[in-house]
Amino acid sequence: MEKSNVIQEKSYRFAVNIVFLVREFPKSVEGYVIAKQLLKAATSVGANVEEALGGYSKQDFIFKMSIALKEARESIYWLKIVKDSQLVKCNIDVYLDKAIELRKILTSIIKTSRRHC
């Protein structure tokens, strides 16, 4: 499987898993605000990967993958908040590990793509 397909599948699965996770958030102000932020960042990773794969140029590809990377980093931030604030009872480390994996894959894709410009 080529790298773009791997990141495409992993970013999609990550987004779906986060959708399920935020359903477990408490119905409170902090639960709502953090759920919204996390959901936006996590689903944006895959959306930007999809845009990158349909890019018009190598520079467009790199730009969209860079946005996906930023969203992955933001997802990590929100997941750390969820974990450290004990907002939910489930194991957040599983989600954090997936977000960190996405960050590493995206970083690798961007570095490789920049070398081949």
Image (tube, rainbow, N blue to C red):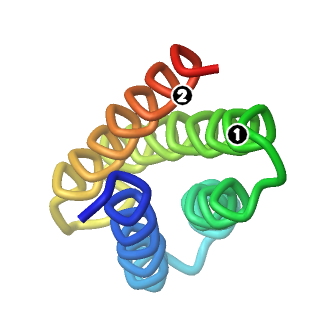
Q: Tag 2: residue type? A: Ser
Callout 2: helix, strand or loop?
Answer: helix
Q: Which numbered disc covers residue 67?
A: 1
Residue shown at 54% from the left, 21% from the top = 116
Residue 87 position, x and y percent, is 39, 58
Q: Quadrant of the N terminus?
A: bottom left
Work out whether residue 106 can be spotted.
yes
Q: Which numbered disc covers residue 2?
A: none
Residue 76 position, x and y percent, is 43, 39
41 lies above or below 74: below
Q: Tag 1: residue type? A: Ile
Q: CA distance from mark 1 to mark 2?
A: 14 Å
Left or right, 97 with respect to 112, comes to left
Residue shown at 34% from the left, 39% from the top = 105
In this rendering, which labeled residue sits more in front, label 1 or label 2? Answer: 2
Callout 1: helix, strand or loop?
Answer: helix
Q: Quadrant of the C terminus?
A: top right
Work out whether residue 29 can be spotted.
no
Neighbor class of circle 2 (other Cα within 10 Å; few <14, some 14-19, many 20+) is some
Q: From the viewer's side, name the closer residue of 108 and 32.
A: 108
The residue beneath circle 2 is 113
Neighbor class of circle 1 (other Cα within 10 Å; few <14, some 14-19, many 20+) is some
Residue shown at 79% from the left, 43% from the top = 57
Q: From the viewer's side, name the closer residue of 3 and 26.
A: 3
62 lies above or below 26: above
Q: On the image, which quarter does residue 108 sit in?
A: top left
Q: On the image, which quarter does residue 35 sit in?
A: bottom right
Left or right, 8 with respect to 91, comes to right
